[in-house]
Amino acid sequence: MAALFGRRMRRGAASTAVAAAAMAALSASGAPSAVGEQPAASAAERPSAGASGQEDPSVTGDSPYHTDLPPLKGPGRNDPPDETPATGSAESGIPGTVLDAYRKAEASLAASNPRCRVPWELLAAIGKVESGHARGGRLDTNGTTPSPILGPVLNGVGFANISDTDGGAYDGDTLHDRAVGPMQFIPQTWESWGRDGNGDGRRDPNNIYDAALAAGSYLCAHDRDLTVERDLHQAILGYNRSQEYLRTVLHWYDYYRKGAHEVPDGSQPAPGAPTGTGGKTPSPAPVRPGTPSPSPTKPGKPTKPAKPGDGSSSKPTPPPTTPPPTTPPPTTPPPTTPAPATRLVDLGDGALSAPAGERFAERPAVRAERADKKPAAQAKVRFTLTGETGTTFEGGATTVTVTTKADGVAKAPALLAGGKPGALTVKATLLGTTEPVTLGLRGEVTAPRADKLVRTDETELTCEAGATFEGRVALTATRDGQAAPGVAATATVLAGADPADGEKAADQGPYFLTPGDEPAEDRRTRELTLTTDAKGNLLLPELHTDDTTGTFRLRVETTGGAVVVLELKVTDPA
């Protein structure tokens, strides 16, 4: 059945009053600043965007949506009073790449915003009604639609009136905005909520990974908890301010929670496109002036055959002739299915290493190959992180699925090193095989580093022999201009004022005391290892002196190569 598209239509005064009362209750919690969540109104009642007192647009600009409902309806715990009959049929299958994007967005948000608890089934419900899961999963290997999915022009004719906000960059329209992509964001809401869900460094509303993560981020706004019915309804209504839309999304949400399965990308029929009538009855095609109207044929009166000599024809009708036989066109052989992938090859150079808290320079990458060792395209590879370092893929997930390109290569998103140094493993698993095919890629998180170290006080480091230096040396370590916490540093007292005097610890002169109960004479040291605090600060212990006078150096070096050298002067007692 061709998909229907919903819009908010003017109803009778009683229905409008009931809807307004319901919407007022649902709207009490407020909305994100990027998109207003106001009570629904008909297109005729709502002012055009930009008018005085105009509400902010919803995520989609209240564009049309698919109104087909699941074939088996059952009231879920989130369903509002039902006024919408089941008008269509659908299957619970979701295209593989689209399903992977929904689940990846759920995992990412569970790590970055655990209070929200956004379920992937809710993202699937919205993706279903907005674009039919990206037109049935018609996506390239990166999860991007081959051509943009565009809503109608929001020029105030049947929909909101939203003047262009992006110069046509997203929707190709420099006069008015249009909803864009699998999750149907209008450009101005995408600028506020757009996310990079696939780790390619771009925010593309036409990419299902980016769009799904952006939709989840919007639904979680204002510290919402989507297991709370009020928050759930408010989030959905912010997407499209319509009670019909709310009911439709909740029906699909409940349906997917009862069971959904993966189907191949592009295996489902693409949903029908909007008719552009906005719910109005199409007008008949215009008739040109002077064109005679066709006369209807009366039923029940067969046409009599013409008789010879009655003036209807001067020649008898020749008998029909049989056309000569034609040669049938050549049969095109059916396309052959390429052989499946049977193994994985590591494409890394063994350099999966990064300091704690930093981005790995290399991304885990493998090539899927067939039995003949040729690249296998469209193979699915799952990357899973294991270890105790706290490392994640960009976006916060620890498991991602990537589809290989024509060269058979699957490259995982960038790795972000956790705060705990240690070993980790990136396990690559080839999906869809009868026998498990896995490959373990080793990695390491090293100690955090600093690229700059500066002293934070200006006290002259001069002391009499046999005494203690006044004050303690304080420094701050930074990395890329930001405080570098947890960075190891070594402080060493060196003999002489000239680097030519050597870099080994002095055997006399200023010294530190290590903690302990032993006599002070046994706790003397001229080399210490310390760690910066949570703000990157480093405070050295007190410096004491023996009876040796002269000039010494205090060298402090951090992991990462940041160095400070200070001069220490020990004078004769006064």
Image (tube, grey):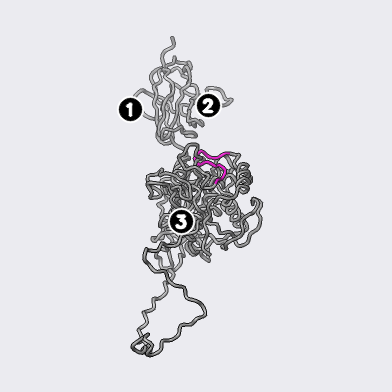
When the figure is inspected, residue 384 is found, relative to residue 462, above or below; the finding is: below
- Identify the magenta region: 30-41
Helix, strand or loop: magenta stretch: loop
Question: Which badge, 1 or 3, is on the more N-terminal residue?
Answer: 3
Q: Nearer the viewer, mark 2 or mark 3?
A: 3
Amino acid at the residue labelled 3? Gly
Amino acid at the residue labelled 2? Thr
Q: What secondary structure is found at the residue carrying circle 1?
A: helix
Q: Residue at x 54, y 52 (%)?
A: 126
Query: Which residue position is annotated with label 1?
Result: 500
Question: Which badge, 2 or 3, is on the more N-terminal residue?
Answer: 3
Residue 23 is left or right of residue 167, and the answer is right
When the figure is inspected, residue 530 is found, relative to residue 255, above or below; the finding is: above
Residue 4 is left or right of residue 557, and the answer is right
Looking at the rendered structure, which numbered label has been put on residue 276?
A: 3
Residue 547 is left or right of residue 223, and the answer is left
Residue 41 position in % (x across, y down): 55, 45
Tell me the crowding category of disc 3: few under 14, some 14 to 19, or many 20 or more residues within 10 angstroms, Cα based: some
Q: Quadrant of the image for the C terminus?
A: top left
Q: Nearer the viewer, residue 147 or 568?
A: 147
Question: Which badge, 1 or 2, is on the more N-terminal residue?
Answer: 1
Residue 193 position in % (x across, y down): 48, 43
Residue 128 position in % (x across, y down): 53, 56
When the figure is inspected, residue 500 is found, relative to residue 368, above or below; the finding is: above
Amino acid at the residue labelled 1? Ala
Residue 314 position in % (x across, y down): 33, 88
Gap in Å between the C-alphas at discs 2 and 3? 80 Å
Residue 32 is left or right of residue 180, and the answer is right
